[in-house]
Amino acid sequence: MYAPKLRELKEALRSLFSRPYTTKFPKEKYTPPEEYRGFPEYFEEDCVGCGTCYQVCPAGAIEMEDSLEEKKRVLRINYASCIQCGQCEEHCITGKGIRLTSKYVVLIPDLEKKDYYNSIEKELVLCEVCGGEIACRDHLKFVRDRLGAKAYAHPNFLIEAQRNFDEPAESHYKGKIRREDYIKEICPICRHRIVVEDEF
């Protein structure tokens, strides 16, 4: 009858004189292991603004806004919605544009505070004929570098390579699509129209 109580007393005394089994967080800072999946962050020099992370995020925590007037794309992570699944990091085309960090605590009393978002801005390349978006400038550079010498077969990549030496002269759309528009930064739809109208 007294055995269970004595066993409890023994455990209490052992716990009193032994070292603690739990961490002292939040009194002391906790250092997570390298494999810990914390909140993701964008890295300016490695992100190309392709939007893959936005497309694969199952929680919808990543927002993508394109401004044609300002020629920029904004990608933003909402930490209040992020579930730290790691899909964004896994599917990143550069492998380093967005990475999970060791950040494990984010207090969110006010959803409007900028501290609870991580965002990045990239320059958008627009079609010189219709004004539609083509891709981000860094995305074009990334694909051009991956293609190597084959990139020079496409006018958009050829113009992008020319920017390494000199900024191309500004061109103006003349109201009707013409063969000369083929050697411009234009979207696939307008490029197709040029080929079709030139042939027929």
Image (cartoon, rainbow, N blue to C red):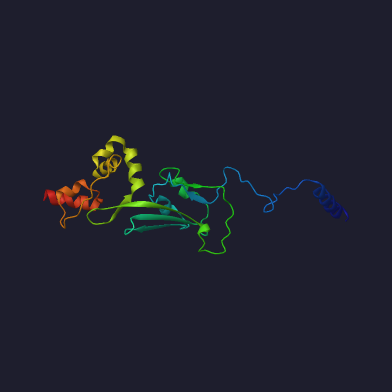
Q: Measuring 28% from the left and 35% from the top, which residue is drawn there?
A: 149
Q: Measuring 58% from the left and 59% from the top, which residue is drawn there?
A: 107
Which percent across, then down, holds residue 171? 21, 51
Which percent across, then down, holds residue 96? 45, 43
Left or right? Give the position of 158 relative to 123: left
Viewport quadrant of the N terminus: bottom right
Please, which residue is most extreme toward the right here?
A: 2
Where is residue 72, by image quadrant? bottom left
Which percent across, then down, holds residue 100? 51, 47
Please, which residue is most extreme toward the left here?
A: 200
Where is residue 109, by image quadrant? bottom right
Taking depth in this image into account, of 53 and 126 the one nearest to the observer is: 126
Please, which residue is most extreme toward the top here?
A: 149
Relative vertical location of residue 80 with respect to residue 192 in this rendering, above or below: below
Which percent across, then down, holds residue 159? 26, 43
Taking depth in this image into account, of 170 and 189 the one nearest to the observer is: 170
Please state the total of marks drawn on the protein image: 0
Q: Measuring 17% from the left and 50% from the top, which residue is drawn there?
A: 194
Left or right? Give the position of 181 relative to 96: left
